[in-house]
């Protein structure tokens, strides 16, 4: 039973803002979402108008309050999660000097290459491998080199997270979550890696970053009176420093202890885990210092294409499942699961490599591509579907093996996202990795995670782990089958063997096609 105290979580995704109200036990009262647009002025560019963010935030917040019937004075705290690497150049009053560079904007690829070539010690966060064109140093350098007037006029170079928090409170701060995972901030090494930024001629951008770097859950300030009136909330309501959507989503799944890992599924897979000690190495990102919970280290891995491959196959090639779904009035996805469940482990020798849009980890190779091998005339639609989800599970296990090689052993995967609807797929993840898979009651984990952080800021809970114990509730655990695990090991090894054998052919073919199409690889 609620005691009349509610927490507001605000989730800024790529395409819109979602507001949720939860009681102090984590039970949702209401969700309200409003979408905004993205502009793509050139290939590889993606921009958004910050005023669209604010307009949608106002509409979603007012809608949530009106539909819930919750009184403004009963909202005890607010926190916000946003996309990461969505970068703005603004003046001291928060007025943007150009559209925001969205996280997926990769115009700074040349700048990223030069950052990687520095070999700076800060690059431990990406295993001394390739630097992403999405990340803050790359985009800051691009702005300085290509829009110097904007760069020089900017009082602050910041992220969506910082701008929204400023609009709410009037205070400029950075979240340690953003700063560590995408800006190379390391509290253990003294904070900002000045040598990295200076090595490529953008050391002065550090003076343009927000001065204060706060842990998630620290109070930034109270909600400004004029903003409270606009949103339908109470002036002075504490606003707690939030973080990046996927990482806050991991908190909303209860990943707040060393050894625990979130597997956030959808079009892609993101893996976020907590470690007690710092670990660094090729094949994964991190370990980020204090990024989620002070005193802990956060590791990260990811697969670019997962659920998107399933959708590609279902929509374009699953003729039998489409026809049967129409006859039975159900989703072809359900038919594919039926067709695949009795196919033996290993799909009778059929293997999928899931690099359809490149590989994020462990290879960090944008020129890698997907493939299916081992085909015979005996293979059916069910074989192909099973091989797809097996290949995705093998990719997840490859990342986990890479982390295990650096003394990180996840005890439990906590999952969220669309693929959790497939019992076959979730059991397969548990079996291939030999790790229990746990589900939680609230699927909208970023919104819940923000509400949990708000509860810490409001003083309801002492810290994020305590909030997780009170507000995240399990819905069941899928235990791995030891016999299935042993059977899958052979196929995981063959999956891992495939990339080194095919890498050069993949690269040469992708580069050839790019030249033929007169497009960048």
Image: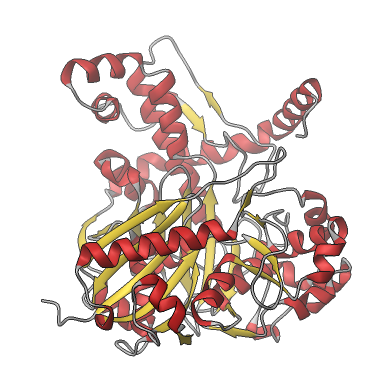
- Where is residue 88? Give x, y as percent: 67, 64
Residue 120 or residue 317, whichever sits in front: 317
Furthest residue in direction left, as rendered: 1
Is 96 situated above or below 342? below
Q: Residue at x 35, y 53 (%)?
A: 434
Q: How is the image coloured?
A: secondary structure
Towards the viewer: 275 or 50: 50
Q: Is residue 27 visible?
A: yes
Asked if 453 appears above or below 484 in the picture, the reply is below
Residue at horizontal 39%, vertical 85%?
Answer: 235
Rendered residue at 28%/51% (across/down): 480
Q: Could you say where residue 345 lies in the image, as x and y percent from the top left? A: 34, 33
In the rendered image, the quadrant that contains the N terminus is bottom left
Quarter of the view holding residue 460: bottom left
Which quarter of the image is occupied by the C terminus?
A: top right
Query: 313 left or right of 2?
Result: right
Tell me the quarter of the picture where residue 114 sits: bottom right
Tell me the residue at 37%/27% (across/down): 385
């Amino acid at each position: 039973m609620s005691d009349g105290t509610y927490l507001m979580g605000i989730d800024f995704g790529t395409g819109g803002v979602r507001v949720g109200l939860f009681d102090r036990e984590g039970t949702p009262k209401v969700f309200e979402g409003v979408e905004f647009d993205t502009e793509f002025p050139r290939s590889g560019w993606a921009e958004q108008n910050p005023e669209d963010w604010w307009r949608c935030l106002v509409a979603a917040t007012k809608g949530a309050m009106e539909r819930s019937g919750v009184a403004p004075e009963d909202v005890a705290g607010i926190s916000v999660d946003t996309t990461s690497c969505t970068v703005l150049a603004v003046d001291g009053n928060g007025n943007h000097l150009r559209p925001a560079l969205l996280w997926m904007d990769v115009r700074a690829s040349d700048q990223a290459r030069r950052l990687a070539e520095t070999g700076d010690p800060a690059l431990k966060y990406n295993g001394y491998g390739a630097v992403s064109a999405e990340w803050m140093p790359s985009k800051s350098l691009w702005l300085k080199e290509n829009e110097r007037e904007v760069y020089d006029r900017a009082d602050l170079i910041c992220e969506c997270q910082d701008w929204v928090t400023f609009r709410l409170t009037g205070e400029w701060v950075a979240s340690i979550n953003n700063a560590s995972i995408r800006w190379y901030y390391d509290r253990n090494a003294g904070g900002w890696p000045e040598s990295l930024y200076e090595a490529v001629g953008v050391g002065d951008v550090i003076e343009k970053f927000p001065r204060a770097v706060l842990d998630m859950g620290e109070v930034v300030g109270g909600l400004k009176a004029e903003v409270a009136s606009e949103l339908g909330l109470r002036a002075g309501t504490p606003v707690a420093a939030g973080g990046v959507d996927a990482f806050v989503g991991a908190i909303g799944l209860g990943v707040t202890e060393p050894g625990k890992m979130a597997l956030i599924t959808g079009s892609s897979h993101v893996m976020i885990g907590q470690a007690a000690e710092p670990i660094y190495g090729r094949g994964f990102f991190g370990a980020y210092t204090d990024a989620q919970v002070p005193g802990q280290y956060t590791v990260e891995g990811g697969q670019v294409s997962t659920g998107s491959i399933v959708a590609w196959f279902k929509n374009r090639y699953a003729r039998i499942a489409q026809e049967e779904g129409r006859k039975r009035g159900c989703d072809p996805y359900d038919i594919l699961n039926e067709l695949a469940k009795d196919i033996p482990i290993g799909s009778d020798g059929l293997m999928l490599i899931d690099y359809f849009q490149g590989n994020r980890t462990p290879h960090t190779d944008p020129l890698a591509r997907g493939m299916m091998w081992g085909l015979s005339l005996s293979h059916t639609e069910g074989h192909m579907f099973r091989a797809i989800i097996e290949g995705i599970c093998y990719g997840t296990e490859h990342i986990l093996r890479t982390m295990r090689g650096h003394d990180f052993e996840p005890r439990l995967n906590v999952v969220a996202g669309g693929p959790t609807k497939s019992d076959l797929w979730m059991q397969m993840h548990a079996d291939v990795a030999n790790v229990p898979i746990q589900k939680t009651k609230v699927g909208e984990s970023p919104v819940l995670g923000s509400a949990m952080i708000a509860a810490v800021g409001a003083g309801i809970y002492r810290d994020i782990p305590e909030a997780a114990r009170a507000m995240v509730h399990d819905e069941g655990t899928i235990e791995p089958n030891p016999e299935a695990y042993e059977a899958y090991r052979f196929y995981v090894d063959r999956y891992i063997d495939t990339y080194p054998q095919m890498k050069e052919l993949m690269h040469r073919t992708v580069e050839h096609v790019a030249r033929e199409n007169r497009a960048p690889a």
